[in-house]
Amino acid sequence: MSTDLSKSPEDGTPAGATAVAGPALVDPRLLVREQGLAGYLREFARKMRSGELGSVPVVVGLIVIWAIFQSMDSNFLSAQNLSNLSVYVVGTGLISVGIVFVLLLGEIDLSVGSVSGLSGAVFAVLAVNNGMPEWAAILFALLTGALAGTVHGFFFAKIGVPAFVVTLAGLLAWNGLMLQVLDSTGTINLDDEGLVATLSSHYFSEVAAAYGLAFVAVAGYFAAQFLDSRRRNAAGIPSRPMSEIAVRTGVLALLAFLAAYMLNQYKGLPLALLIFIVVLVGFDLLLRRTTYGRKVFALGGNTEAARRAGINVTAVRISVFALAGTMAAFGGLLIASRIAAANQGAGSGNLLMEAIAAAVIGGTSLFGGRGKVWSALLGMLVIGSIANGLALLGSPAHVQYMITGGVLLAAVVIDSVSRRTQKSAGRT
């Protein structure tokens, strides 16, 4: 009697084979979205338990900080104070954007404070002392920062000197060069009506400016999410449903138009804040939507794996440090704009620590491979709010240092615990 290996008419399984029963695999994201609000809440709880905290700690911390200071001084959340805070965070925030890229590599740049001071001095000497057109002096200042960053990147990526040592040497060398550039003048006052001074002093007083920016931000976000969802559907991969996109857009619209309303209660939309937001959006797209951004994340995750995948590790590392130097120069110009001067104290004090702390507090990991450009904004809001609130209360500077140091330590502890929890949960 022969064995019939033909397919069974009931299920199409060969008669001589054992049928393996079991449910078809379904993407968990689809299940979450099918379950509605309850599914999202369970997914949020799962992420918290597994260490995928995202921006939750810093947002909660910012709300707590604002609530405490508002309870102690009713002027803290006034339109004027919030407007001043939005201008204050821009200079250091721009420096912190470059730090985010360096941290994504798992490295550190200790020179950004000195580079920012040097670039401000270069601009002031060229524009004020030598009469160079301001736009040209700005270009030279930015090139100064880019060149300094490239030097750091070369010694780190090509020669193999640790980034900590290279940038520590840069901190000292560029600070010395700044003193040499300023020479005996010490302080150079900028033209109050000049281009650089206007960056921090100009406000778009028209009500439509702030509301227009809010509308563009909300519309742009919705369009990006909608188009991304369509592409995913066309490719047959999970995508956000329209209901989720609508809710996310609605939350953003509430925050954006509330911010616009508050700004319009004082002087309107600050030019400095507009510049910061444009920079953040641009670098966010660079990091998340381009091949270059994926290479940066790849190097931060596993350098050897990235090298074997064909990524030019040396070129990416040099470019990241050059970018950090350029952003330090840009931030230095905004800081000089805010005080309308370049002086020998520029780039010193707690500027370096604030720039690094902002990136870390905002959610960028010190261990590399995880973070967002928006970390610079969130972190600077925390640091700026602490400084601003304590100033309103008349607290001495050392209290601000202690509190900021404690917040930074808390951010690093949360990052470390989060990584350990994700590793235990098999998420890394």
Image: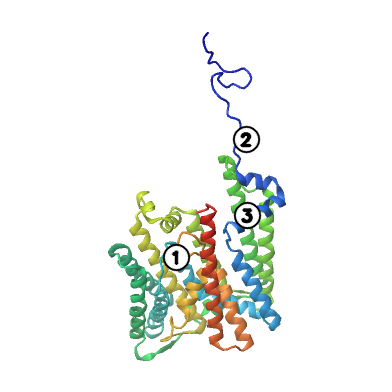
Query: Which numbered circle lies on residue 34?
Result: none
Q: Classify 10 Å Cα crowding around label 3: few (below 14), some (14-19), many (20 and above).
A: few
Quadrant of residue 383 in the image?
bottom right
Closer to the camera, 174 or 271?
A: 174
Q: Residue at x 45, y 73 (%)?
A: 330
| Amino acid type assigned to the residue bearing label 1 in the image | Leu
SS of the residue at dot 1? helix
Q: Residue at x 62, y 54 (%)?
A: 46
| For residue 274, above or below residue 33 | below
Q: Is residue 379 left or right of residue 209?
A: left
Percent across and percent down for residue 306 are 38, 52
SS of the residue at dot 2? loop
Quadrant of residue 167 in the image?
bottom left
Closer to the camera, 165 or 372?
A: 165
Q: Residue at x 60, y 81 (%)?
A: 388
Does residue 333 show up?
no
Residue identifier under label 3: 46
Q: Residue furthest left?
A: 159
Q: Is residue 245 left or right of residue 119?
A: right
Q: Earlier in the sequence, mark 2 or mark 1?
A: 2
Q: Residue furthest bottom?
A: 184
Q: CA distance from mark 2 to mark 3?
A: 23 Å
Q: Is residue 370 left or right of residue 203?
A: left
| Amino acid type assigned to the residue bearing label 2 in the image | Pro
Q: Are marks 2 and 3 in contact (CB under 8 Å)?
A: no
Residue identifier under label 2: 23
Q: Are marks 2 and 1 in contact (CB under 8 Å)?
A: no
Residue identifier under label 1: 103
Quadrant of residue 403 in the image?
bottom right
Q: CA distance from mark 3 to mark 1?
A: 27 Å
Percent across and percent down for residue 412 are 51, 69
